[in-house]
Each structure stands twice: as C-alpha cells, then as structure tokens.
Amino acid sequence: MTTDPASATPACAADALERTPLFAFHRRHGARLCAFAGYEMPVQYPLGVLKEHLATRAGAGLFDVSHMGQIALVPRSGDVADAARALETLVPADLLGLEEGRQRYVLLTNEDGGIVDDLMVARLRDGLVLVVNAANKAADTAHLRRSLPDGIEMRPIDRALIAVQGPGAEAALAPLAPEVRSMRFMEAREIDVGGERCLVSRSGYTGEDGFEISLSDGHVEGICDALVEGGVVPAGLGARDSLRLEAGLCLHGSDIDGATTPAEAALGWAVGRERRPGGARPGGFPGAERILRELAEGPARRRVGLLAEGRAPVRAGAELFGTEEGAEPCGRVTSGGFGPSADRPLAMGYVPAAMSEPGTRLFAEVRGRRLPLVVSRLPFVPAGFKRS
C-alpha cells in the first residue's frame, strides 16, 4: 500500500492540491504539510516522526488516510458471489471463499504478471468494498469500469478514512465503539462509532494491531478530536512509512509495481490456494501463466530485507553489489531509512535468488562508498496483530 512521502507528487501550488476532510484538524495540530498523490497531507506534527513512530508502537497513533480510494462493487443480482466471481478475473485472490464480514489483501495484476496495485477487499452483506492506493485510484477505477461486467455496479465511496494503530488502539477506540473489542484481525463490520454508523476493519499498514474507519466527512473531525483527547497521538506520512518499513510491508510504486510479480515480491501468499493448480478455480486472472510458474519454480530475483552493519541509512535507489569491489550491480534498494523501534538503519530491495538467503553479505553504494549490509528475514519488528 502507498505510504511513502518520498513518492509524493512534485511540489505545486497549494490551490492545485486536494484536501482531505481533516485538513483543518491537521492545521490545528501544527502539522507540516506536503504534496502527496495530489493531496496536501501531513508529513509530521510538532512531536516529530521518531516520537510519532514510537508512540504508535507503544500506544496508539492516528493517521489520516482519506486520500486513498474507496469503491463499492454491488451485484445487480443481489448475490455477492457474482461480484466476487467478477473481481476474481482481475486478481489471483480467492474472493468466492471470503466470508461475509472478512477482508483480504489482494493484488491487481497485469498480463505480464506484474502488480498494478495492492488493495484491501472486504465482503459485506450486499457487496464488496475495495480500498485502493491514493496514487492509483483513478487508474484503478478506470480499469475496473472497463473490465467488470454490466451486472456489477461500481460506486465510489466519498467518505473520510482514518487509521488508529498500535497496541493501545482497541482501548482508545472502545469508548466510542464498544463493539471493536470483539473484532478479530482482518474483520470488517458496520458498527456505531460515536453515534454514527461506520465501516470498521481491524487492520492497517503499520504491523501493529489497529482499526481503519470509513465515516462521513462531517463526523470525522469530532471522532479524531475525541481520540486525541483520549491519548491517541496524531501521526503523519513519515511515521507511517517508517512503521511499514519495519513491518516489511511493500510500498506500491517503490517495492512493487507493474513490472514486479508476486513471487518476486515475496507476496506469493496473496495468491489463493483455490487459484493455483489443483485448486477449484486455477488461473483465470491476468498474468496467471507467469505467476503460477514462478510460484512453482521460483523467480529469478526476490525482495529481501537488508540490515546495515553501520549506522548510516541506505535509501531507495542505492545499487547493491555482491562484493565490495564488484563492478556490476546485482540489485537495488527499493525502500530504506532508519527504524526507530529497531534502532538501526533498515532497507528492502531486490537481489538475484541465489543471493537472497538470510545472512548473505552485500554492499550498497552510497555517495561513492560501499556500505555493508546483511540479508535479513522480514519483518524487522514482530507483528502485533490480534489473531483471536
């Protein structure tokens, strides 16, 4: 999912940028704003990225994700299975097997097996709800309209979206929505939050327990004020990016894109068993031949975690080498920075499969110097999801 301020749209006049329903909230709380995916978004608040990050890991952080796209797919037949079946022609996930009230991480693929976008899909009583990346929502919407049959009605959802993340998220949200206490990881329900019916999922993109809440523009600022009064810390794109990096989560446009396959990205688990050979509905999605072949035989390159041996961070774009003197790069860093919880520089990148084993020593070229790194298992910080 897209989170990184480094992939923000180029700087442009403020009046050319869209604003989320929480723009006034961000200003009141002293946020530093930047252009991101066509929106004016908070990078950080006066507390600073590092403290926002650590506050989320220790308690609860509040993130505005209203810039992301929300889309409902409603079958005219009234049978949600029709919407699931239609969307399965575009993704390798098992959506027919997705139970009502559950959601799933899904990859939208192209004919070459590349990842056009990564998104969340929730199954509700009357249809599917998709949350897509901000930078891709126009293209995703056009692709869905072009590809889905007439029997599936597509409805853009014009609502705010916030994420409350961290081990203290449940306790912080429960006074406004007691029902969240009984929710499990990746569950999605329509429940009352502060007196308004909202769509709430127990999910997020920080590696922590937490919730994402879709609610009306007129209701969102009051809910955020109540959460902050209860001790939740406002956090911006900077902390969101360092949190997802520590969690080993991909950023679309950096770690994954239309030229990256699920197997290369270590996202093969997002290809449902029912969609694989021997399953009930094998293939039938764009790029199936290559995707299924690579899952069976292995890809030529893989996404890996990288731990720097020193204290200097290695940023996205740095070339990777197999030896300190090697003339030809063997790979490239796609995300990198300092991990506040890990208390050390972290990175992810792509290397040949033969160099992807944990413990393999590599070198990154940073300002003319070769800095040593070691291939590491992901995530860098253990996940804190509520599994039961």
Image (spheres, helix red, strand yellow):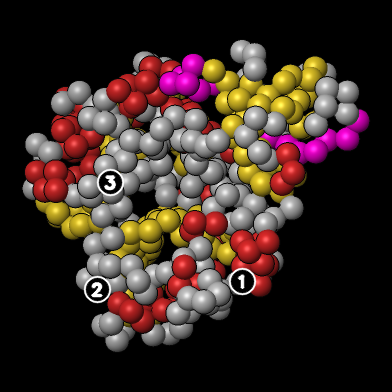
Along the line of sight, the residue nearer the viewer: 226 or 90: 90
State the extent of the magenta-drawn residues as a range: 327-343
Along the line of sight, the residue nearer the viewer: 122 or 372: 372
Q: Is residue 264 left or right of residue 211?
A: right
Q: Is residue 36 left or right of residue 101?
A: right
Tag 1 secondary structure: helix
**Residue at 62% from the left image edge and 39% from the top image edge:** 304
Residue 283 image point, x, y percent: 56, 76
Tag 3 secondary structure: loop
Residue 387's tag is 3
Question: Who comes first in sequence, dot 3 or dot 1?
Answer: 1
Q: Amino acid at mark 2?
A: Asp
Residue 386 image point, x, y percent: 27, 42
**Residue at 52% from the left image edge and 37% from the top image edge:** 378
- Label 2, on which residue? 126
Residue 20 image point, x, y percent: 37, 43
Residue 288's tag is 1
Q: Is residue 209 above or below residue 145?
A: above
Rounded to the nearest angstrom, the CA distance separating label 1 from label 2 is 29 Å
Assess whether residue 68 is covered by the magenta stretch.
no
* Of marks 1 and 2, the one in the foreground: 1
**Residue at 65% from the left image edge and 17% from the top image edge:** 309
